[in-house]
Image (tube, rainbow, N blue to C red):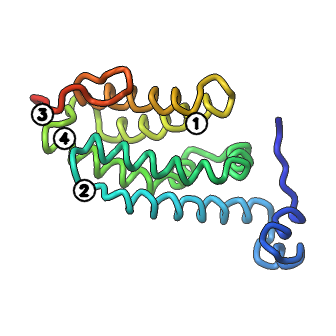
Amino acid sequence: MSVRVGADAVAGAAGVTRPTVYAHFPSREHLLLAVVDRITDEAVAAMDAADLDAGPAADALMRMLDAGAQVTRRHPVLLQLIGAHPVGPQAEHDRHAPVAERIRRVIERGRRTGEFDDRLPLDWLVAATIRLGHAASEEQDAGRLSATAAQDALRTSLLRLLGAGAVDDAGTRADSSPRSR
């Protein structure tokens, strides 16, 4: 199903007129970029509020992903609309940069403490974390996984990818001892 949101709908949701929308955003693409920036800022603020420096790194990563998911669940139509407008690899990278920096910080901390192994390149792990998050969301949106199953699949996959030790059926770490490097 394709979703189209016109300037009238945006203006109505914002409580302004259509000319006001166009006065601030000369094109649909500019409007979408502004929406991406706004949702990203909101998600990053929620992630930062999850106290990423506290507790085990795996727990911090899960708190961060949960915080981001709570924000994105509030904007499903907007995110579907944004996702329908493909962008180049550099724009995609730039779009995720604030989130990627936080993921990187948590993974690096987990490596320093021995909680995560260091056999895979850090940039790969950051990119894979973002892609797995998208995959979980897409499977849920398509109705192939329930919200709980998508969250569990994401948790289990990430903890395995990061070498965080054994995980149980709920995707939580069964052993919290540091990994040898």
Circle 1 residues within 10 Å: few <14, some 14–19, many ≥20? many
Using the image, tell me which numbered label, if any, was put on residue 111. Answer: 4
Residues at marks 2 and 1, CA–CA distance in whole angstroms = 26 Å
Mark 4 and mark 1 lie on one chain; the one further toward the N terminus is 4
Image coords of residue 8 (percent x, y): 90, 65
Disc sitting over residue 156 in the figure: none
Of callouts 2 and 1, the N-terminal one: 2
Read off the residue under disc 3.
Answer: 178
- Quadrant housing the N terminus: top right
Of marks 3 and 1, which one's residue comes earlier in the chain?
1
Nearer to us: label 4 or label 2? 2
Examine the image and state in which quarter residue 160 appears.
Answer: top left
Q: Earlier in the sequence, mark 3 or mark 4?
A: 4
Kind of residue at badge 1:
Ser
In this view, the residue in front, 124 or 65, is: 65
Q: Which image quarter: residue 10?
A: bottom right
Badge 3: residue crowd in 10 Å (few <14, some 14–19, many ≥20): some
Along the viewing direction, whichever of 24 and 141 lies nearer the viewer: 141
Residue pictured at 72% horizontal, 65% vertical: 30
**Which mark identifies residue 137?**
1
User: Hey, what amino acid is under mark 3?
Assistant: Pro
**Label 2: which residue?**
53
* Residue 67 image point, x, y percent: 46, 52
Q: Say left or right for 115 vs 22.
A: left
Disc 3 to disc 2: CB gap under 8 Å? no
SS category of the residue bearing label 1: helix
Q: Earlier in the sequence, mark 3 or mark 2?
A: 2
Q: Is residue 142 above or below residue 113?
A: above
